[in-house]
């Protein structure tokens, strides 16, 4: 870990995997072991590891799952108990479910992980109703809305990829300017809008694209090829 001077911190779905080019990026990363890898994903640990393993991507320095609510340290993927404790301080899933149980049109759909409670909404306008209900009951939380599925996920208010990444970099002793970030979606926005160099791949959300700082590259390539495009340009500029 002491030899790592630069890091790629990347989302998985829609960024590293899902639009082709995975093999090219994998081969590049395997050929450059001096470049540390941090995966940041909305998936659970088991799901993320299964996907990473399917494509043969390198073991990470760390992986942040559930949009940054959990951190695991590689290669043995040991849970960071201090980080988990910090999330539990702000997380009350039972109180949250109780508060929303009497809101018409908000239907509980279960928990995909310890840190994620899912609801189905009858109407888009109910997103603001849910936010008001949580605020009224003093329940700080982060809300992710998936309109195509009419699904609303609620996570701890501290579940942020940027927050998890800052903690990981501090632990491994890598400066922000030596970390290259890559993403495509709304839950990557806080990471891409921070002080890191990075790339938004071509299939990135328009809402994210319109809010990014000028130093974030906008690749013309989708998915993994967009990651590789941005990463190689950044490394060439910083030799």
Image (tube, rainbow, N blue to C red):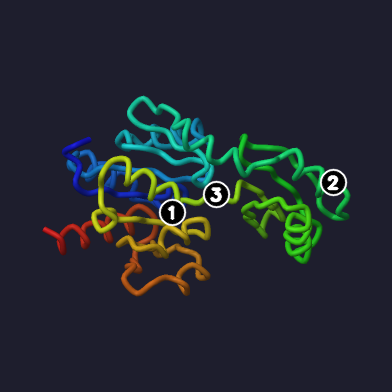
Query: Residue 84: horizontal and vertical position, in percent?
Result: 52, 35
Badges 3 and 2: C-beta atoms under 8 Å apart? no
Per the image, the residue denoted by label 2 is 101
Question: How many numbered circles are shown?
Answer: 3
Which residue is more in the foreground, 165 or 181?
165
Per the image, the residue denoted by label 1 is 162
Query: Residue 31: horizontal and vertical position, in percent?
Result: 18, 40
Q: Quadrant of the C terminus?
A: bottom left
- Asked if residue 151 lies left or right of residue 108, the reply is left
Per the image, the residue denoted by label 3 is 158
Query: Residue 72: horizontal and vertical position, in percent?
Result: 42, 33
Badges 3 and 1: C-beta atoms under 8 Å apart? no
Residue at screen point 62% across, 47% down: 155
| Nearer to us: label 3 or label 1 | 3
**Residue 44 versus residue 166 in the image, above or below:** above
Which residue is more in the foreground, 70 or 201?
70
């Amino acid at each position: 870990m002491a030899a790592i001077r630069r890091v790629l911190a990347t989302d998985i779905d829609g960024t590293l995997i899902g639009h082709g080019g995975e093999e090219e990026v994998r081969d590049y990363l395997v050929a450059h072991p001096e470049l540390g890898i941090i995966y940041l994903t909305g998936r659970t640990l088991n799901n993320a590891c299964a996907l990473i393993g399917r494509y043969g991507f390198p073991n990470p320095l760390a992986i942040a799952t559930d949009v940054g609510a959990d951190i695991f340290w590689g290669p043995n993927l040991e849970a960071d108990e201090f980080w988990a404790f910090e999330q539990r301080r702000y997380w009350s899933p039972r109180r949250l479910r109780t508060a929303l149980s009497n809101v018409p049109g908000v239907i509980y759909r279960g928990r995909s992980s310890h840190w994620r409670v899912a609801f189905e909404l009858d109407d888009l306008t109910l997103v603001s109703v849910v936010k008001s209900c949580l605020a009224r009951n003093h329940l700080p939380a982060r809300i992710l809305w998936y309109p195509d599925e009419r699904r609303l996920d609620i996570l701890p208010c501290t579940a942020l990829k940027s927050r998890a990444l800052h903690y990981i970099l501090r632990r491994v002793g890598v400066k922000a300017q030596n970390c290259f970030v890559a993403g495509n979606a709304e839950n990557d926005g806080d990471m891409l809008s921070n002080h890191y160099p990075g790339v938004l791949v071509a299939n990135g959300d328009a809402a994210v694209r319109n809010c990014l700082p000028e130093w974030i590259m906008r690749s013309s390539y989708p998915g993994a090829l967009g990651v590789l495009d941005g990463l190689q340009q950044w490394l060439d500029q910083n030799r």
